[in-house]
Image (cartoon, grey):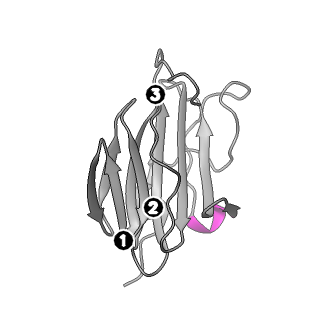
Amino acid sequence: MKSPSVAAIWGPVLLAGASFHAADKPPLSSAVVTWEEIQAKPSPNGRSRQVFQSRTATLDELELHVTTLPAGEASHPPHKHADEEIIIIKEGAVEAEVNGQTRRLGPGGVIFEASNELHGLRNVGSGPAVYHVIRWTSPGARPLEGTR
């Protein structure tokens, strides 16, 4: 069975197709983006598709990207930051570390990473893992020293 497209999953929630910095552009306004419109670019550990990254009417920043992580790779070492994230697994098998606990997830699995809690992700499958990362910064969130 073919995986649903980002547009089918998110429909009108997808807001803009261009990546840009929050401070120098107006807030995101509603739009729809197809999977084919989101350009894949090499990243340090696979590929990334930046869907959007901007401030909104209610958030300092809202970001959505889709990562393709090769088998055996970690996205990065476990870390923490003030932002909160939701990760939705589209394809493959991952192992998620959240506050010292590890869980294995497959397609449809969801991870919530709370502000300032240690987290990490590794592809434990035999093929690529593909997952959507939705990250936001609320007004007044205080970043940890040395983080984004």
Q: Which residue is mark 1?
A: 93
Q: Is residue 142 left or right of residue 118?
A: right
Q: The residue under label 1 is which amino acid type?
A: Ala
User: Which quarter shows the C terminus?
Assistant: top right
User: Which quarter shows the N terminus?
Assistant: bottom left
Residue 26 % position (x, y): 67, 27
Q: CA distance from mark 3 to mark 1?
A: 27 Å
Image height of 145 relative to 5, above or below: above
Tag 1–tag 2 contact (CB < 8 Å): no
Q: Which residue is mark 2?
A: 131
Q: The residue under label 2 is which amino acid type?
A: Tyr
- Single out the residue that lies furthest toward the bottom: 1
Q: Is residue 16 left or right of residue 109?
A: right
Image height of 148 relative to 108, above or below: above
Q: Is residue 74 left or right of residue 55?
A: left
Between disc 3 and disc 2, whose residue precedes?
3
At horizontal 49% and vertical 60% (from top left) the residue drawn is 74
Which span of residues is magenta-colored? 35-40
Q: Which residue is mark 3?
A: 82
Residue 138 % position (x, y): 45, 24
At horizontal 61% and vertical 59% (from top left) the residue drawn is 49
- SS state under label 3: loop
Residue 124 % position (x, y): 39, 71
- Determine if the magenta segment contains residue 32: no
Closest to the observer, 134 or 118: 118
- SS state under label 2: strand
Closest to the camera, between mark 1 and mark 2, is 1
Image height of 7 relative to 24, above or below: below
Q: CA distance from mark 1 to mark 2?
A: 10 Å
Between disc 1 and disc 2, whose residue precedes?
1
Q: The residue under label 3 is which amino acid type?
A: Ala
